Amino acid sequence: MAEKTRRSEITAFLSELLITTRLSGIGKHYASEVTLDYGHKKGEPKRIDFMQFKPANTYSISGIERGEFIGYEVKSCIEDVFSGNGLNIECDRNYIVTTMDTWKKLIELEQNNKKKIPYEFGVMVSCYKDKIDEFYNPTPLIEMDGWRFEVVRPAHIQSRKRSISELLFCMLRSGR
């Protein structure tokens, strides 16, 4: 039970950090728990932890239509990454959001050819200090002040299979 509580705390920490450092502010548009394929009989609905829409600009139709969708899947531990829940590749760019400890375990699994995260996904890790220092001596997750995210593996841009209208509607329906 303590492990599940710890995972919940890490997920809450990462989610709040993502909202405050990457998703909130003027000109930023996001939604959480975005459900796709809701009500379809084909398979289960897909859920993305956080989806952000970044228009090229907001003063022209083409600027909005050239906007980019970024998906963020918050993963508190290695078991969460490979649980089969999440890791939906639906946005132009997709990221796993995690801790440095989990990132180190992912590297080890990939180096030992045991498991790999999908090629399309980038990885963002929470850092309190320089990412190199954080890698060798991870800081325990404490209060929010001073933390930020560092991209340790860039996302590979994908050709989206869903229209801007559909994704914006799904974001709107999620209610934030």
Image (cartoon, helix red, strand yellow):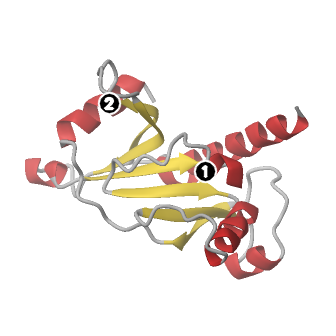
Q: Nearer the viewer, residue 26 or 133?
A: 133
- Residue 71 placement, left or right of 131: left
Q: Is residue 145 above or below residue 38?
A: below
Amino acid type of the residue that numbered disc 2 sits on in the rendered structure: Cys
Task: State the residue in front, 32 or 17.
Answer: 32
Q: CA distance from mark 2 to mark 1?
A: 25 Å
Q: Of all residues shown, which one is farthest toward the bottom?
A: 132
Q: Is residue 49 visible?
A: yes
Going from the N terminus, do you reach mark 2 or mark 1 first? Answer: 1
Q: Residue at x 46, y 71 (%)?
A: 154
For numbered disc 1, what is the local secondary structure?
loop
Which numbered marker is on residue 82?
Answer: 1
Give the percent coordinates (x, y) of residue 141: 81, 54
Image quadrant in which the N terminus is located: top right
What residue do we see at 21% from left, 48% from top? 161
Q: Nearer the viewer, residue 156 or 110?
A: 110
Task: Determine which residue is flagged by label 2.
Answer: 170
Q: Position of residue 48 (x, y in %)?
A: 45, 39
Count every numbered label the image shows and give the total.
2
Q: Position of residue 91 (x, y in %)?
A: 33, 50
